[in-house]
Amino acid sequence: MPAYKRILLKLSGEALMGDDAYGINRSTIVRMVREVQEITQLGCEVAVVIGGGNIFRGVAGGSVGMDRATADYMGMLATVMNALALADTMRQEGMTARVMSAIGIDQVVEPYVRPKALQYLEEGKVVVFAGGTGNPFFTTDTAAALRGAEMGAEIMLKATKVDGVYTADPKKDPNATRYPSLTFDEAIIQNLQVLDATAFALCRDQKLPIKVFSIFKPGALKRVVMGEDEGTLVHV
Ligand code: UDP
């Protein structure tokens, strides 16, 4: 039995990139989708928020002199591309997925409508949320917190490269240890960067727990969903 009935999975654009320098790596996206498929087969309802950093980030545009808001809209469009790739791979793997976008792009994907998204989840379809929050100056982590709260997800699973939150950077400090769990307040006091400040505040206000885990570790997603000791849990 999975520990959660409904989860919000935040996948960064980088998660689709594999070892490539840019874009979407075929074998990586297939592996990712199979991990998600495994948890749907456990009976877990899955909503996904996908990032866009493998294609474009607003800060990158801003740093080369573009208007920041315009660059952020480019970033949001990048998430739509990733969502299309993700849903297409899901379909090829025999899953049923729906993409919903926070920015109007109706010829390509359907718009985000909360009751419809809830219905899809109840029907066992995977919902991929594209376009972030639909607003510049936000991140897809914030979109994940927002959609997680809106969908009534029991937890937000933040897929990263590192398998949890550490006392120090494990790449630099050999004595760094992983926190199995910590509270929101402990994360603030110890200045641990779990999510960006806006996303973190939203999760904390809405009492939406966060689990940070590595998507590059085979089987980790399933272990998280089964409630096993994997990654770091941030709770109230
Ligand atoms: N973005 C935005 N508003 C949002 C979500 C995303 O403007 O609500 C833009 C922003 O420019 C960001 C880019 O989309 O840099 C890609 O999202 P993000 O950096 O969160 O992707 P990830 O790091 O998860 O791949």
Image (cartoon, rainbow, N blue to C red):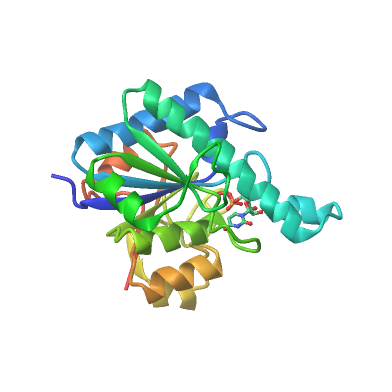
In this picture, is 69 found above or below 99?
below
Give the left or right position of residue 28, taking residue 118 as reference.
right
Quarter placement of the C terminus:
bottom left
In this picture, is 10 found above or below 150?
above
Residue lying farthest left?
A: 1
Quarter placement of the N terminus:
top left
- Residue 218, image x and y in percent? 36, 33
User: What residue is rendered at 33% in x and 72% in y?
Assistant: 207
* Displayed quadrant of residue 33: top left
- Residue 227, image x and y in percent? 22, 51
Q: Is residue 203 visible?
A: yes
In depth, the one of 143 and 125 nearer the eye is 125
Give the left or right position of residue 15, taking residue 96 as reference.
right
Give the left or right position of residue 10, taking residue 36 as reference.
right
User: What residue is rendered at 73% in x and 60% in y?
Assistant: 69
- Residue 165, image x and y in percent? 44, 58
User: What residue is rendered at 30% in x and 32% in y?
Assistant: 37
- Residue 204, image x and y in percent? 40, 73
Number of marks = 0
* Displayed quadrant of residue 215: top left
In this picture, is 227 found above or below 138?
above
Q: Is residue 224 visible?
A: no
Residue lying farthest front?
A: 107
In this picture, is 56 found above or below 206?
above
